[in-house]
Amino acid sequence: MKLTCLIPAYNEEARIGAVLQAVLGHPQIDEVLVVDDGSADGTSAVVAQYPEARLITLARNGGKTAALARGFAETRSEIILLIDADLTGLSPDHLSALIAPVKSGQAHMSISLRDNAPLLWRWIGIDYISGERALRRDLLTGQDEALRQLPKFGFEVFLNALVLRARLPLAVVRLPGVKSPLKSAKYGVWAGVKGDLGMMRDLFRAVPPLGLVRQIILMRRLRA
């Protein structure tokens, strides 16, 4: 089955190069697609230095969901590997670990558990909003209109809901050494707090708070 690695990026000039170095040339990845979500920095210029990657640059920032939706529309691969553009410590072995459960048929979706995931998520064994996932493309068949209605940061919990609705097996894959920087480290304390609050607002718009708790409980039960 063909596999595309889809990387949404917004103002990740300083970090996306390291992610591309881990992804490009991986023997199981047939295509690397970066969607620059209207960055105001040199993100697209950095990606352009890697001609093996396909770059789509959006005219304005529409949010992570919009960037991912555009990426899905641009590829027909049966398996999609989602990787955030700001990761540190990512290696080809981590990618192989995420891909394996889906490619083997053990799971319909795999989801990462990073070293710096919140302590509670590490304790319960699942990070329900992790951006690093591998999934079967057919999970999103017929969901185009629903994707257009999602808030900027509602994509991951929407995926969770699709998996749970169909009671599909999922795999949790620990990624030792991989970290995602806090928004406060990238944008400053107050901008980081504002960003985190905006993300939580979008999560609650996509799925009510009690629905998120239910997602976590059911996802733990469906772990392959």
Image: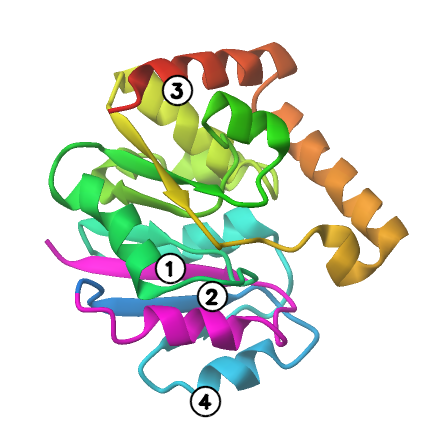
Q: Nearer the viewer, mark 1 or mark 2?
A: 1
**84 to the left or right of 78:** right
* The stretch drawn in magenta includes residue 35: no
Q: Is residue 199 above or below residue 213?
A: below
**29 to the left or right of 198:** left
Q: What's the amino acid at mark 1?
A: Leu
Sequence-first tag of 2 and 3: 2
Q: Tell me the residue that label 1 is attached to.
A: 6
Q: CA distance from mark 1 to mark 2?
A: 8 Å
Q: Tell me the residue that label 3 is attached to.
A: 219
Q: CA distance from mark 2 to mark 3?
A: 28 Å
Sequence-first tag of 4 and 1: 1
Q: Tell me the residue that label 4 is attached to.
A: 49
Q: What's the amino acid at mark 3?
A: Met
Circle 3 packing at 10 Å, graded few (<14), some (14-19), many (20+), is: many
Q: CA distance from mark 3 to mark 4?
A: 39 Å
The magenta segment: 1-27
The structure residue drawn at horizontal position 34% and vertical position 13%, both measured from the top left corner, is 221
Q: Nearer the viewer, mark 2 or mark 3?
A: 3
Sequence-first tag of 3 and 1: 1
Sequence-first tag of 3 and 4: 4
Q: Where residue 41 sits in the image (x, y, percent)?
A: 68, 77
Q: CA distance from mark 3 to mark 1?
A: 23 Å
**190 to the left or right of 124:** right
Q: Is residue 75 visible to us here?
A: no
Q: Where residue 24 sits in the image (x, y, percent)?
A: 31, 74
